[in-house]
Amino acid sequence: MSKSLHSELILDQFTRQAVPFATAPGIQDETALRLVVEFSGAGPDDTMLDVACGPGIVVCAFAKVVKHATGLDLTPAMLDRARTLQQEKGLANIAWQLGEAMPLPHPDASFSIVTSRFAFHHFLDPLAAIKEMARVCRPGGKVVVVDSAPAPDTADAFNAMELVRDPSHARAMPLEELKDLYRRAGLPEPRTTGYRLEGELEGLIKRSFPNPGDDETLRRIFRASLDGDTLGIGARRDGDTIRYGYPVAVLVADRR
């Protein structure tokens, strides 16, 4: 798929997803946000950039701790949501930018922390993305990636399901592949932790915009995963509800 066509898919998906994505309980999870901020080692002298910031949830979480935070995203509707969230939280130390992740519109060594959450599985060239993150991170700073991280034996099924759910999906990588991106980008071995993004199927469908008819395909895929956990997400019944827990990896490396 060409970069221009893929960018059009992302703009289409995330313009429509702006409100439902921003208000999803798992995306707003304060415990998960606190884990990311604390694991990064962020402090009052830091300046941070969040690449593909979406509705600004990560930026606002860091802004409570750091000197200044910047969020960059391709989708104007997401930045509108981000500005609204900033106003709701009364945060003044934030800037928002409309722009691409590759290349980033910033000089070398511009920030002490560079993050990206739930975006790498949308990048056609994740290695180029992390190299850009490393470029704009100053020596001694931190490069932080948070993304879905399926187990190797379920990654193909997980990615096939995600592509049905979201046509702008590219590929979610197992943890070892994410760690290898750091090595290939010339970064040291990252520290890692993780959590599970909990949710329920019908809520997931409501905030997704699959192709016509694929909402029922998604239901069939989840039902098939109830026996044997073929997606690696712990799909399970809770009465009439199907619940799940997406595996999420958090990786942090020091910029030498």
Image (cartoon, rainbow, N blue to C red):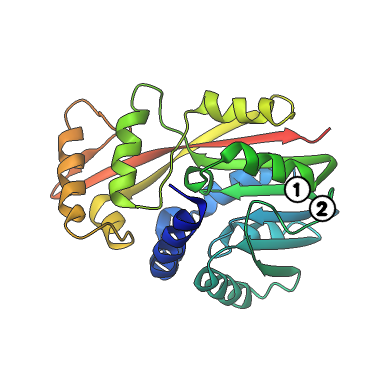
Q: Residue at x 80, y 36 (%)?
A: 255
Q: x, y percentage for residue 244? A: 30, 42
Cβ atoms under marks 2 and 1 closer than 8 Å? yes
Mark linked to residue 13: none
Q: x, y percentage for residue 163? A: 33, 45
Q: x, y percentage for residue 211? A: 25, 58
Position of the C terminus, as image quadrant, is top right
Q: x, y percentage for residue 115? A: 66, 48
Q: Disc 1 designates what residue?
A: 113
Q: Secondary structure at mark 1?
A: strand
Asked whether 42 or 48 is in front, the reply is 48
Identity, as a three-letter code, of the amino acid under mark 2: Asp
Q: Residue at x 54, y 23 (%)?
A: 176
Of the two numbered discs 2 and 1 on the same chain, state the one appearing first in sequence: 2
Q: Disc 2 designates what residue?
A: 46
Res 65 → quadrant: bottom right
Camera-near label (2 vs 1) is 1
